Image (cartoon, rainbow, N blue to C red):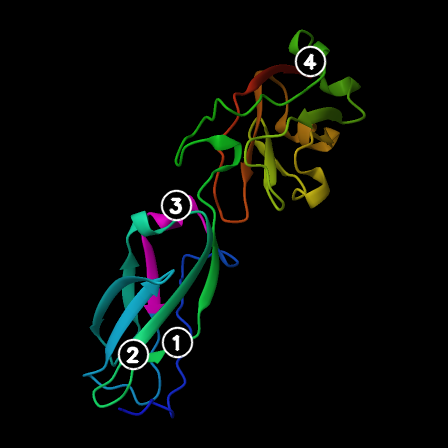
Amino acid sequence: MPPFISTIKLPPAHVPQARNGFIGAHAAQDLQVHIEPWPQRHEHDQIAVFWNGTFVDVRPAALACYEAFSVPPWLIGNGVAHVRYQVLKVGHRPRWSPSLRLWVKLKCPGGGQLGEDINPALAPLGLAARLMTQPVYLHALDAGLAFCLAPWRHMATDDTPTLRWGDRRLDLPAVTAQQVGHALRGVIPASLIHEAGPHAYTEVSYCIIDRAGNHSGWAHGRCIDVRA
């Protein structure tokens, strides 16, 4: 029986597109597994990569730099993924790397499609009914304006909404576990509204980015008449 390569400690695989241990829908379309060099690497060594136990590819080891393996999109599904590789060395039994554990999240917030600019599945930003029919006068605006975000499809912890008032942006706090499935309420600061200035058709909208980097697209905008 050939011996193990007992002197070699293999580093885990590296997936550069992973975001805090998560793989999103965009990254999954062109996902790569990088294998870094290890001590005693030789040109006749073979590297075989496995995604959740399914064989991906095998090739000779590169000596000068890392080796990049592409993962077919059909192999990548929602949930936990385990990435390992095997070193096949002449005269030795195969050696396995430690398992790299990743979370795959392919469902975009709001249920939109990847790359969609406007997401019709997102409810428009909730504002007071009077703002739809009456102008907002900056000279009389001392406090901010209350808003409400309806819960969206695939709402999850750490989803981060961004509100857009005209050409200004307001990043909202990340969603907590207790907020999932519930409406989010807040106030658009008066300072931001003053910064954006008067405009007869100020568009107000929002989007969500989840912890895997998936973008919801923007909700249909509401037009507000803002006057000096």
- Disc with the residue nearer the chain's start (3 vs 2): 3
Which residue is identified by label 2?
87
* Residue on which the image places disc 3: 26
The one of 148 and 195 positioned closer to us in this rendering: 148
- Give residue 97's mark: 1
Q: N-terminal of the two: label 4 or label 1?
A: 1
Q: Secondary structure at mark 2?
A: strand
List x then y, in percent, for residue 189. Answer: 73, 32
Q: Tag 1: Cα neighbours inside 10 Å, few (<14), some, or many (≥20)?
A: some
Eye-nearest disc, 4 or 1: 1
Give the residue drawn at x 35%, y 83%: 38
The image shows residue 120, relative to residue 6, as above or below, that is above
| Circle 4 or circle 2, nearest the eye | 2
- Residues at circles 1 and 2 in contact by the CB criterion of under 8 Å: yes
Choose between 81 and 19: the one closer to the eye: 81
How busy is the neighbourhood of tag 4: few (under 14 within 10 Å), some, or many (20 plus)?
some
Instruction: Please tell me in which quadrant of the rendered image residue 57 appears.
Output: bottom left
Q: What is the span of residues highlighted in magenta in the rendered image?
A: 23-34
Q: Residues within 10 Å of mark 3 (few under 14, many from 20)?
A: some
Name the residue: 65% across, 31% down. 195
Give the Cα distance between marks 4 and 1. 60 Å
The location of residue 41, given as percent across then percent down, is: 28, 86
Q: Which mark is residue 131?
A: 4
Instruction: Tell me where residue 39 appears, x and y as whole percent.
Output: 35, 88
- Residue 69 is inside the magenta segment: no
Q: Label 1 is placed on what type of residue? A: Ser
